[in-house]
Amino acid sequence: MHKKEISKAVINRLPRYYRYLGDLLEKDEVRISSKELSDKMKVTASQIRQDLNNFGGFGQQGYGYNVEYLHAEIGKILGLENKYNIIIIGAGNLGQALANYGDFERRGFVVRALFDISPELIGTMVRSAEVKPMEELEAFINDNKIDIAAITVPKASAPIIATDLVKWGIKGIWNFAPVDLNLPKEITVENVHLAESLMKLSYRLSRKKKETE
Amino acid sequence: MHKKEISKAVINRLPRYYRYLGDLLEKDEVRISSKELSDKMKVTASQIRQDLNNFGGFGQQGYGYNVEYLHAEIGKILGLENKYNIIIIGAGNLGQALANYGDFERRGFVVRALFDISPELIGTMVRSAEVKPMEELEAFINDNKIDIAAITVPKASAPIIATDLVKWGIKGIWNFAPVDLNLPKEITVENVHLAESLMKLSYRLSRKKKETE
DNA sequence: TAGATTGTTAATCGATTAACAATC
DNA sequence: TAGATTGTTAATCGATTAACAATC
């Protein structure tokens, strides 16, 4: 028997729920109703309840949801109870920015090393991770239990490197290169296409400009 | 009379069409049918035709689409025929990474300055843009025609800075802080939530792991 | 108990896909 | 002209919202 597949739209919303619940938790809020949360997040209460009920009944009639409990449960759903070892391929500004962002580590994502071809970068430290030469990549993956590789290299090299990474056993790829990686379906690829994000902004700006003309 | 609003799903796909057409253009491809493009992009040909016809009939029966023409038209739709002046608030690694990314400039997005509070950064150059003190922000916006402000400051300061930016006339915000900015609806905000992207990756990884257990 | 709010079913809305006549 | 492929309408599918009985 097949458990109903969770839709992509729902999954996309989960991290945002998690963030809002984390914020409430920091403010020592104990309980919240779907209605209150819906006001804050500007989505319908109905959608919140539908989304959560894909995973289980986390609330209580007449009361609402316990903030701490719901936060923890969504964290589990998102797989945040696991620890993830990350390597970053490409130690340019973006790679360094990712390595330096301490919030990831708080959530259990630990950057183990960066890799680059530039001799000036090799050997330097970014936060607590070393920049290593690409030649050591395969061995490093073999010797360490690496879960995720972030790709921040130029467009042209990204597909080649991705193929290598998969060959060497990487299962999760966080891709920042402006290209779609065609990899076996058992590999999980999450894309961050900054240029496309900027174009969406420019679309909306230029359309608003046209409206007022 | 109201022209039918273009759905968000369609707009989200436009930059990807634009990218694929740009790639084809570089390979000197002259024409492409919705079927061929659908094979490459792994979406249905029907969706491609539907999406494009929201904006006009760019193709020709029996022939398909002229790559160069369609690329240019989508560029116009996305507002890429305009030039955009950008400032970056926060000159940390991420801000510097954005300023250094030359591809944006090629598309008409020019970084005019970065702003930061850190004395070590102030006065330094990132590519062709200077890091200036936050005190000069208001004057700089007044003296230059700034279209977009990228926010790469910590979560706590982001909403305050965003409010100031709006007060000083900024209409477009590219927000990298992990917070939702509640601004007047005439302000266009495009969010890049890296932590949420990483959580989506971890969700999918941990679910695949469970499946094989 | 009475009031509040969930969990869930049913209704609606919107987006995607299929089909095909129009036409290059 | 015959073949190919668009533009567009109609059918299907999926996601969101509304409604309300269940129940804390």
Image: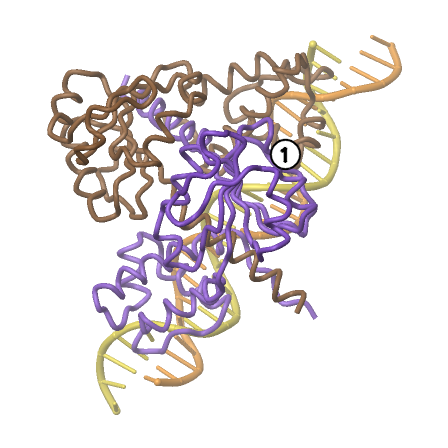
Chain colours: A purple, B brown, C yellow, D orange
| Vertical relation: A144 (above or below) B177 | below
Question: Can you say whether A30 is above or below B20 in the image?
Answer: below
Report whether A9 appears left or right of C2: right
Q: Which of the two residues, B183 or A213, is positioned nearer the viewer here? A: B183
Looking at the picture, how far across and down is residue B83, in whole percent? 35, 15
Q: Pointer 1 indicates a residue of which chain?
A: A
Badge 1 marks a residue whose secondary structure is helix
* Placement of the C terminus of chain B among the 4 image quadrants: bottom right
Which residue is located at x 38 percent, y 54 percent? A16
The residue drawn where x is 27% and y is 33% is B91
Residue drawn at (60%, 43%), measured in percent from left and top? A137
Quadrant where the N terminus of chain B lies?
top left
Q: Please name whichever residue, A143 or A1, is drawn nearer the observer in this view of the structure.
A: A143
In the rendered view, does A147 fall on the left or right side of B198?
A: right
Give how far across and how far down residue B45 sits, in percent: 67, 31
Q: Position of residue A149 (x, y in %)?
A: 55, 46
Instruction: Name the residue carrying label 1.
Output: A159
